[in-house]
């Protein structure tokens, strides 16, 4: 998997994810490196909900980044 700069990841997340809470979850995981458990606690969700959000958007984000490279 290619490595992307934080600014490219942030741009992709902002462009592809329209829900503000979901954007925050993705940024914490992909940019800040938080665990699912830490994000879940902070966002008042379960780790499974966080994982589902990550799964929902990951392919879209990487497709966006691949097309922009």
Image (cartoon, rainbow, N blue to C red):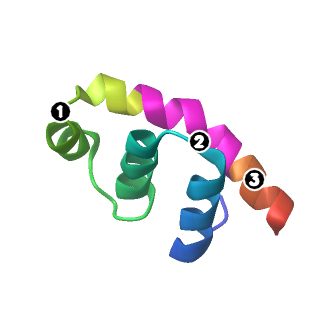
Q: Secondary structure at mark 3?
A: helix
Q: Residue 64 has which mark?
A: 3
Cα distance in 3D space between marks 2 and 3: 10 Å
Say which residue appears at 20% left-offset and 39% top-offset.
Answer: 37
Which of the pair 44/38 is nearer the observer? 44
Residue 42 is left or right of residue 27, and the answer is left
Q: Give the residue pinned by disc 1.
A: 44
Going from N to C along the chain, the mark reached first, 3 or 1, is: 1
Across and down, in percent, residue 67 comes to 85, 58
Going from N to C along the chain, the mark reached first, 2 or 1, is: 1
Residue 13's image quarter?
bottom right
Whether residue 5 is visible, yes or no, is no
Q: What range of the chain is rendered magenta?
A: 52-61
Q: Give the residue pinned by disc 2.
A: 58
Q: Main secondary structure of the magenta part?
A: helix
Say which residue appears at 64% left-offset and 58% top-offset.
Answer: 12
State yes or no: residue 64 in magenta.
no
Across and down, in percent, residue 11 comes to 61, 65
Using the image, determine if residue 2 lies above or below residue 35: below
Whether residue 15 is visible, yes or no, is yes
Residue 51's image quarter?
top left
């Amino acid at each position: 998997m290619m490595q992307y700069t934080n600014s490219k990841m942030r741009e992709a997340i902002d462009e592809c994810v329209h829900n503000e809470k979901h954007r925050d979850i993705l940024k914490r995981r992909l940019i800040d490196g938080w665990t699912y458990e830490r994000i879940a606690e902070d966002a008042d969700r379960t780790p499974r909900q966080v994982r589902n959000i990550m799964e929902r958007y990951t392919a879209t984000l990487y497709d966006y980044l691949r097309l922009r490279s």
